[in-house]
Structure formats: structure tokens, C-alpha cells
Image (cartoon, rainbow, N blue to C red):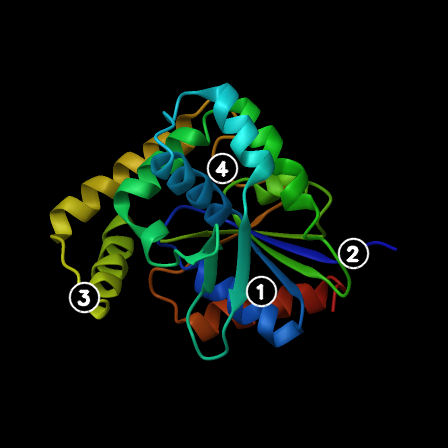
Amino acid sequence: MLIPIITVDGPGGAGKGTICKRLAERLNWHLLDSGMLYRLLALSAMNHHVAVDNEAALKVMASALDIKFQSIAGQEGICAWLEGEDVTDAIRSEDVGMAASKIALQPAARSALLARQRAFAEAPGLVADGRDMGTVVFVEAPLKIYLTASVEERAKRRHKQLLDKGQSDTLPRLVEAIKARDDSDMNRAVAPLKPAPDALTIDSTLMSIDEVCQQILDEAAKRGIL
């Protein structure tokens, strides 16, 4: 039996997490936040004082990560647990994000996480959020979305998230951090961030969450996935 899969790739801050969670809830499908896996590995490496370029150690850690995901109704995104501790907020820090981006350059670590990601594909279906879901992990997916937005808009969204959590950062610094992350993701040698050849590109800069979700659902229905 072929499991229907919708992949949503794109740069950080484009709205992938919120969109994918809402799609998964609407369809009652499974949800994979692959970026969260890399952030969990990054945080684990930081906690255990493992360098982000120690490929051998990262491969072992990736294979043995003690993690758990939990989706909570009415709450944006999903919660993540590492070694029995709720680290949902901790893995969203800029430091962890940059470490995750560096770890994503390691072929051995990516290979170790690949099987864990593909195991999420179970009936009745899967919504997969990431940067290489449609280009590497689920190349057979019948619907691939590349979700993007302007750097300025993504920085504004991140700034609002931080303020809502009682944290602060400057917009100029966030813009530079996002540009640096984009550059790292798009120019890495292994699985660089890019649209799959058959992906539908959606620019969410001037779109609401509901508008993006509806466009994806309409496309899925058109292709006979739903």
C-alpha cells in the first residue's frame, strides 16, 4: 500500500511548521518535523560536549537519540522531548539552529537520521516538514511544496515569536542570522536546500496561514491524493 505523502520544504521562518501541523490535524495524518530532529541532535551534542564536526560521534548519537514528539491541540507546532526533558523552547534558539545547520553538513549524521525520518510514513498519510523532504527523503511523494517568504518577513515573524515568549532580539540581527542560515542550507554539499524539480512553489510573504493551507489542500485534491 502506497502511503500518501505531502512534503513541505523551504527556508526557516517561511511558516512550514505551522502549516504542516495544521495540515496534519485537518487530514488526521502523521506529522514529521525533520528540522526538529536535527535541532534535537544539535542540542544533544551541545549537552554532551560533542563538536558539531565530529562526524563519527554524531552518527552514533543520531542512531541512539532518546526523543519523543507530542502534538498539543491549540498549540502552535509540536513539543519535543530529549532524554525525558521538554526541550521545545531550547531547540528553537539561534545557537541550536546554527549548530543544526552545521550538523546537516555531515553525511554520516544525515544518513543515520534518514531511516528514522522515513519510518514516519505510515497510514493514513504523512505531512513532512523540512529542507530536503521532497528532494532526498521522500522523492516519491505525490505532492511536493516549496514554501518560501522574504527574508524581512521571516525576520519579523521570528521577532514576534521571541517577543511572545518574553525574549528579545533586534530585527537587523535576525535578518543577518536568517541570511547566514539560508546561505549554509542552500550551499551545502550534501542535500542543499532547493525546490524539487516537480515541487509547487508558494510564496507566503503576503499570505495568511489559512490561504496557504487551502492552496495545498486544493492541489492535493486536484491530484487525487485526498
Image location of residue 9, percent across then percent down? 51, 48
Query: Label 3: how many residues lie within 10 Å, few (<14), some (14-19) or many (20+)?
Result: few
Marks 4, 2: nearer the viewer = 2
Residues 35 and 81: in front is 81
In terms of sequence position, does the residue under pointer 1 or pointer 4 come before the other? Answer: 4
Element class at badge 1: helix
In terms of sequence position, does the residue under pointer 1 or pointer 3 come before the other? Answer: 3
Quarter of the rendering occupied by the C terminus: bottom right
Identity of the residue drawn at 23% across and 67% down? 165
Image location of residue 129, percent across then percent down? 53, 53
Q: Amino acid at mark 4?
A: Lys
In terms of sequence position, does the residue under pointer 4 or pointer 2 come before the other? Answer: 2
Marks 1, 2: nearer the viewer = 2
Q: Amino acid at mark 3?
A: Leu
Q: Amino acid at mark 2?
A: Ile
* CA distance separating discs 1 and 3: 29 Å
Element class at badge 4: loop
- Can you identify the residue that label 4 sits on? 194
Marks 3, 4: nearer the viewer = 3
Image location of residue 207, percent across then percent down? 38, 67
- Can you identify the residue that label 3 sits on? 163
In terms of sequence position, does the residue under pointer 1 or pointer 2 come before the other? Answer: 2
In which quadrant of the rendered view does residue 180 lie?
Answer: top left
Q: Residue 216 bears which disc, if any?
A: 1
Circle 1/circle 3 CB separation < 8 Å: no
Marks 3, 2: nearer the viewer = 3
Identity of the residue drawn at 34% across and 42% down? 97
* CA distance separating discs 3 and 2: 39 Å
Horizontal arrangement in the rendering, residue 42 relative to residue 192 (left or right): left
- Can you identify the residue that label 2 sits on? 3
